[in-house]
Image (cartoon, rainbow, N blue to C red):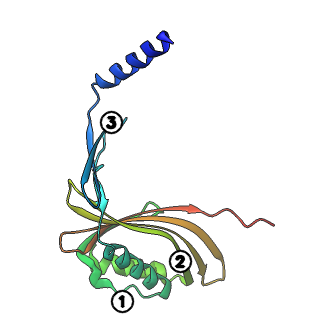
Amino acid sequence: MKKILIMVAVVILSACNSNEPKVELMQSGSDSTKIADVTYPYEIMYSSKFEIADPKYGKMILDLWKDWDNGDLSAHKDNFADSLEMHTADGSIMSGMRDSVLAIAQGSRNTLASAVSRVHSVTALKSIDKDDNWALVWGMETDTDKKGKVDSFYLQETWRFNKADKIDRLYQFRQNSPPAKK
């Protein structure tokens, strides 16, 4: 028993004397704000301090998803900043003035006969230390090209909003869905 207590004391003291940087995380609560020290094993390049943001940001992105499904990206083009950058799942980066970037995206959508999206989850986050709002969407899309070929895949998209609440950046990740079991 003594050996166990000594080992526990050594572990606790070692943790207290760690030279690793501490990161404060804020969690909003209804009656108080709780702060906890967390040590991460990697340097955080952007931020690790997020809180839930206004759900309007998630709705704005889902409106865009619906525009994609409907085949008309111009319906909510005013949700975009004058210049934007889109990192798409195929590794392409579209960067430039809104109308030019949206024209490229519309050209891509025009190659499809149909697109059907299903949303698994949507959330809006605010980076406390960077003062940026983001919307994250997880879902699945099934596309049918003009020749009738069907392709289904999972999507994860991270959208950033500028200070004027306009979309200025997208990061998109894709995973092909497994073939249907026979």
The residue singled out by tag 3 in the image is 39
Count residues near mark 2 (Cα–Cα under 10 Å), then give few for <14, some for 14-19, many for 20+: some
In-image side of 47 versus 176 (left or right) = left
Q: Residue at x 64, y 83 (%)?
A: 147
The residue singled out by tag 2 in the image is 117
Q: CA distance from mark 3 to mark 1?
A: 45 Å
Q: Amino acid at mark 3?
A: Thr
Count residues near mark 1 (Cα–Cα under 10 Å), then give few for <14, some for 14-19, many for 20+: some
Q: Quadrant of residue 168?
A: bottom left
Q: CA distance from mark 3 to mark 2?
A: 38 Å
Mark 1 vs mark 2, foreground winner is 2
Q: Quadrant of residue 123?
A: bottom left
Q: Residue furthest top?
A: 2
Relative to 37, is 166 above or below? below
The residue singled out by tag 1 in the image is 75
| Along the line of sight, the residue nearer the viewer: 134 or 39 | 39
Q: Are marks 1 and 2 in contact (CB under 8 Å)?
A: no
| Along the line of sight, the residue nearer the viewer: 53 or 179 | 53
